[in-house]
Amino acid sequence: MRVVTLVSCLAIVVLLACRATAAEEIGPNLIRDGGMEQWRDIGPQEPWWDYLTVSLKTWQFSKTSAGRVLAPAIASQFYGQNGLLLRDEQAHRGQYAMRFTGQLYLAEAGKDDYQTADAQEYLVRYWAKGAGDTVMHVHVYGDGVPQVEIVSRTGNAEPDRWTLIEQRMRVVGKGATTIYPRLYAAAEMLIDDVFVGKIIPEAALPQEPVTPDLAARVAMAPRAEAPLTIDGRL
C-alpha cells in the first residue's frame, strides 16, 4: 500500500497555494523605439520641418552638418514653449540616448496600442541621468472624466550615474478610451530605454486547454518502510 506522508501533503498544499496567488504579466512596450536608436533626419519640404523649425523655434534640436534636424522616433508631439532635445552618445544601452529638457508626448509603437479601459494599470520604466526632476504623465481620454493616478514611484535621477525610474499607474474614473504618455524633465538630463506596458492580471491572461494526458492530478510518494507514527513532528 502506498501512503502520502504529512510532509508530501504539506508540499502539495504549498504548491497549490502558490499557484492560487494572484499573478500578473507585463505587456509589450506601447511606445515607439524606447531605446532611442532611431532618429529621423528631417530637411526642408519634409514632414515635421515647419513644425520643428517654425512652431518650435524656441526649442533646441540636434542638426546635421547640412543643417537638417534630427528628431527621435519616440517623439510624437512637443509641449511648452521651450525645450531641449539632442541626440547624445552617452547612452545607458545601445548607441544613443536623448538629452532632454521640457515635455514630450510619446509616439505609440503600433496602431491602437494606446487604447485603454477603466481600471487598466500600466508599468512605466525609464533610465535617467541628471540633476533635474523627471516624471511620466499619462493623459486619459474618454466620455467621462477619466484620469491616471500614480500608484507607486521609485527612483530619483542622479547627476553622475544612470538611475531606473519606475512608476505604476492606474486609470481611474469612467469612460476611458485612449491614453497619451508625456515625459517631463525639469532640467537638462539624459533619458534612455523608455518603456510603457499594460499590466495584465492573471484573470485576463489567455488560458491554454489541458491535454487529456495531463488532466489528471497525480501525487507521487514512496512506499512506507515501517508503520506510521503520529507524533506531530514534520
Image: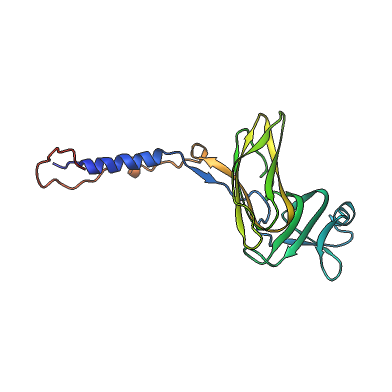
- Residue furthest left in the image: 226
Residue 90 appears in which quarter of the rendering? bottom right
**Identity of the residue drawn at 79% across and 50% down:** 78
**Identity of the residue drawn at 88% across and 51% down:** 55
- Residue furthest bottom in the image: 65
Is residue 187 placed above or below 116 in the rendered structure? below
Image quarter hosting the C terminus: top left
Q: Is residue 43 visible?
A: yes
Q: Would residue 97 appear left or right of 168 to someone viewing this image?
A: right
Position of residue 93 measured from the top left corner of the image (x, y, whole percent): 62, 64
Q: Would residue 24 appear left or right of 75 to someone viewing this image?
A: left
Is residue 122 placed above or below 144 in the rendered structure? below
Residue toward you, 66 or 97: 97
**Identity of the residue drawn at 86% across and 53% down:** 56
Q: Would residue 62 appear left or right of 3 to someone viewing this image?
A: right
Position of residue 160 measured from the top left corner of the image (x, y, whole percent): 64, 63
Position of residue 75 measured from the top left corner of the image (x, y, whole percent): 75, 53
Image quarter hosting the N terminus: top left
**Identity of the residue drawn at 9% across and 41% down:** 227
Residue 67 appears in which quarter of the rendering? bottom right
Is residue 187 placed above or below 111 in the rendered structure? below
Q: Would residue 182 appear left or right of 168 to someone viewing this image?
A: right
Q: Is residue 47 visible?
A: no
* Label tally: 0
